[in-house]
Amino acid sequence: MTKISNKRILITGGAGFIGSNLCAYFLENNEVICLDNFSTGYRHNIENFLSNPKFTLIEGDVRDFKTCEAAVAGIDFVLHQAALGSVPRSINDPITSNEVNVAGFLNMLTASRNANIKRFIYAASSSTYGDSEALPKVEHIIGKPLSPYAVTKYVNELYADVFSKTYGIETIGLRYFNVFGRNQDPNGAYAAVIPKFVAQFLNHESPIINGDGEFSRDFTYIDNVIQMNELAMLTENPEAINTVYNTAFGERTTLNELVNALKEFLSEYDYEIANVPIIHGENRVGDIPHSLASIEKASKLLNYQPKFSMREGLKEAVKWYWNNLKK
């Protein structure tokens, strides 16, 4: 695959899980500017980049328009990852989620338009599919949102569409499906399920599955997400821009299957993990039962060919967690 090179790339939320992986990848051949306020990102995710002359850290908040204006100066591409993730967080605090995810998004989009940025690529979300029961999920069929977080991510898509039509800025939204991999934080109230389960297994604690474990997700390894971001930057096909894409592997895994795979891979490092029992709890408010992406559109228009299945990615992630969480 052709690689983006010799560009100035702004990555908002660059100290977060996905953002720091994008920083690491694009720093190899480009200049990277990272904007982060460290509300959910971590300095240790980017500390290895700080001595790199091609890396610049701007500590600031996307809710401040002047900060956004300063960050986009001289930039070729914006990869907007900054957001307050998590459905439960948005249910507990919808106001802050809206301020960051909607007002912050609009600040970045407006600053990018004013600075004549070539292309604005942003993290959309599979939560936009809401109560639509159709499987697999195809980009042009969505339901009603089931959480404040889902509302904010849908509003992002609406603003991007209006800006591309009204002002001519090129936008591409990537609807991430349950991304996992290195640098994903296992701690905190809103930790994603995979790192949380891994950390519990490593401590020989029983993970709690919400419901009977038959809810399913399209778990997507981080390297597939990096590939999609690069393809979104590279495309010159007019049909491929000013739209949204599912960013996934295109395979459904139940939580029971996920936990069994984690036990299998972690047991290679610590055989006692195979005997850790699983606990089932209540279903979580705002959760959709099943999620499976069609990646046909991305395949056709961007030539997206994900390299990591859930199991292949999980093996890599488990190796990373073993080396980093056991220190």
Image (cartoon, rainbow, N blue to C red):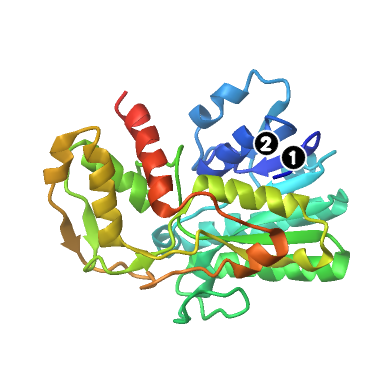
Task: Name the residue rendered at 24%, 59% in the picture.
Answer: 209
x, y percentage for residue 151? 55, 70
Separation of marks 1 and 2 at Cα, in angstroms: 8 Å
- Vertical placement of 259 versus 187: above or below? below
Question: Which residue is rendered at x = 22% and y = 42% of the image?
Answer: 201
Quick check: 177 left or right of 159? left
Q: Where is residue 43 shown, x and y percent of the image?
A: 52, 29
Q: How crowded is mark 1: few (under 14 residues within 10 Å), some or many (20 or more)?
A: many
Could you tell me the amino acid type at mark 2? Phe
Which numbered disc flags the more N-terminal residue, 1 or 2?
1
Which residue lies at the image location 72% right of the left edge and 64% below the top edge? 301
Residue 237 in the image: above or below residue 49 = below
Q: Mark 2 points at which residue?
A: 26
Image point (52%, 53%), residue name: 84
Could you say which quadrant of the image residue 153 lies in? bottom right
Tally the marks. Answer: 2
Quarter of the image with the N terminus is top right
Given residues 85 and 122, the one toward you in this image is 122
Q: Do the residues labelled 1 and 2 touch (CB within 8 Å)?
A: yes
Name the secondary structure under disc 2: helix
Res 187 label:
none
Q: In the shown orientation, is residue 52 left or right of residue 255?
A: right
Q: x and y percent of residue 92 in the render? A: 40, 61
- Which residue does the numbered mark 1 point to in the structure image? 9
Q: What residue type is labelled 1?
A: Ile
* Residue 108 visible in the shown view: no
Q: Dot 2: within a 10 Å radius of its alpha carbon, few (fewer than 14), some, or many (20 or more) residues? A: many
Asked if residue 78 lies left or right of residue 268, the reply is: right
* Helix, strand or loop for disc 1: strand
Q: Which of marks 1 and 2 is in front?
A: 2
Q: Can residue 132 be seen by looking at this rendering?
A: yes
- Residue, far top: 51
